Image (tube, rainbow, N blue to C red):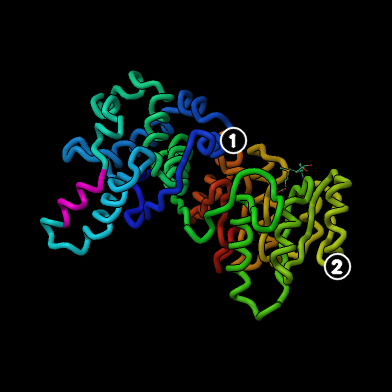
Amino acid sequence: MDLRLDPSFNFNCTSIFREDLVLLGYLPLTTLCSEHTAVNLAIVSMMFSFCSREDGFCDVPAVGREFRGLKARLVRVLGKVAPRLPAKLGRLAALASRRSWRESRCEEIMEVPRAEIFTHIPVANLFECMRKLKDASFYHWQILLHGAILLRSFPSTVRWTLPRAFFGGHAGEDAEEEARTYRSFALLALLQHLALEKAPLAPLVAVEIGVSWASTSRALLRALPSLHLILVEPEIQAIARTRMLEFQDRVTWVNEMSREAAAKVEDQSVDLVFIDGDHSYEAVIEDIRAWRRKLRVGGVLVGHDFTAPQRGVVRAAAEFALRVNATLGLSPDCWWLFKPKSGWE
Ligand SMILES: C[S@@+](CC[C@H](N)C(=O)[O-])C[C@H]1O[C@@H](n2cnc3c(N)ncnc32)[C@H](O)[C@@H]1O
C-alpha cells in the first residue's frame, strides 16, 4: 500500500483539532492509535512529510495563531510571491514563509529514529504536535487513515481512491439541507454524477438498505427531485414514516430484511444501492451478493461506515473490490464501486 500523499494536494489549511480527529473514526483516535501500529505509522509518516530535518523547515505556512499583525502579513506575502521570483530569491522567500521545525515543536519527534517512534513517543504527543501545526487538512488525514485502515487488513493489495468530488460534509445526522453528513454528501455527488448520463429529469432509482430515522433519505429526496427511493427496513420507525410523508409519491417502503427485499426488485433496474443495514462482515457480504445484480451497468454500489471500528464493513468491501479487480472509491465514511460493462459475476 502506498501511503505517499497526492502530490497535487492542496493545503487549504482547514484547521484540524483533536475534536475533528475523534470524529474521524467515531472512536477516540488515541485508542485507535495505541492499538494499531498502522495508524500510528500513517501519522508518523505524515509528520515526516511535513517536517524535514534536512532543511530545517516544516512544510506548512508559518501563519498560525502565534503570528500576528505585520509579521503574519509579511509571511503571507512572502509565501505568495515566492513562485514568481527568480529561482534563488524564490527559494529564500519560500523558506522564510515556512515554519522552522523547531518552532513547530515537533523536534522531539524529529529527533527520535523512526523505528523507535512507536515505542518511545506517546500517541498523545503526536496529536499535540499535529494540533499545533494545525494545517493538516481533513482530506489529508482521511487519506492517511484510509490507507492505514486498509493496510492493517490487506497489505499492499487493495487499490483505492479518495476523489475530491465525493469528499465533503460533516459527521453526525442530517439536520438542514446545507449541513450534509459525509454520507449524504458522497451519495448526492454520486447520484448527480449518475444523473449526467441520463436525459434531464429522467428518474433516478436508488435503494437504501437500513433507513433508521430516514435522515439520509430525506436529505437525498430534498436535494434531487428526480430521485425515487426504495427504502428497505425491517423495523420502520414512526419518525421515518412521518418524514417520508411529503415525498410519498417518490418513496417505496419495503418492510423486510435486505435479502428478502432484494428478491422483489428486478435485476438491472437500479442506479444506486446504499448498504447501511447490518454492519457485520457476513451481512455486508450477503447484501453485496443479493443487490449487485439489481444494479444497472454503470450504476454504483455504495456502503456506509467504512471506518476503523467497522472491521466487517472494511473487510467485506475490500474483499469484493479485490475479487472484481476494481478500485475502491472512498469518502470520509463510505465505500463504493461502479458496475462495469462486464458485470460482476
Ligand atoms: C445505521 S442504521 C441506518 C441509517 C440510515 N441509512 C441513515 O443514513 O440515516 C441501520 C438500520 O438498518 C436496519 N437493519 C438492520 N439489519 C437489517 C437488514 N438485514 N436489512 C435491512 N435493514 C436492516 C436497522 O433496523 C437500522 O434501522
Q: Which mark is residue 249?
A: 2
Image quadrant of ligand 1 equals top right
Mark 1 C-beta closer than 8 Å to ligand 1: no
Asked if one can make out residue 180 in the rendered structure from this viewpoint, the answer is yes
Dominant secondary-structure state across the stretch colored magenta: helix
Q: Quadrant of the C terminus?
A: bottom right
Question: Looking at the image, which residue is at 59% across and 75% down?
Answer: 197
Outermost residue to the bottom: 199
Whole-number angstrom distance, CA of label 1 to CA of label 2: 35 Å
- Mark 1 and mark 2 lie on one chain; the one further toward the N terminus is 1
Q: Which residue is mark 1?
A: 26
The answer to which of 32 and 14 lies nearer the viewer is 14
Which residue type carries mark 1? Tyr
Percent of width and height locating residue 107? 26, 28
Identity of the residue drawn at 70% across and 54% down: 176
Highlighted magenta segment, given as a residue range = 90-98
The one nearer the camera, 220 or 177, is: 177
Instruction: Name the residue located 57 percent from the left edge and 54 percent from the top edge.
Output: 336
Q: Is residue 326 magenta-colored?
A: no
Q: For residue 39, which quarter of the picture? A: top left
Residue 188: assigned label? none
79, above or below 237, in the image: below
**For numbered disc 2, what is the local secondary structure?**
helix
Residue 56 placement (x, y as % from top left): 19, 37
Question: Would residue 9 appear left or right of 223 to someone viewing this image?
Answer: left
Residue 92 part of the magenta segment: yes
Residue 328 image point, x, y percent: 50, 53
Q: Is residue 158 visible?
A: no
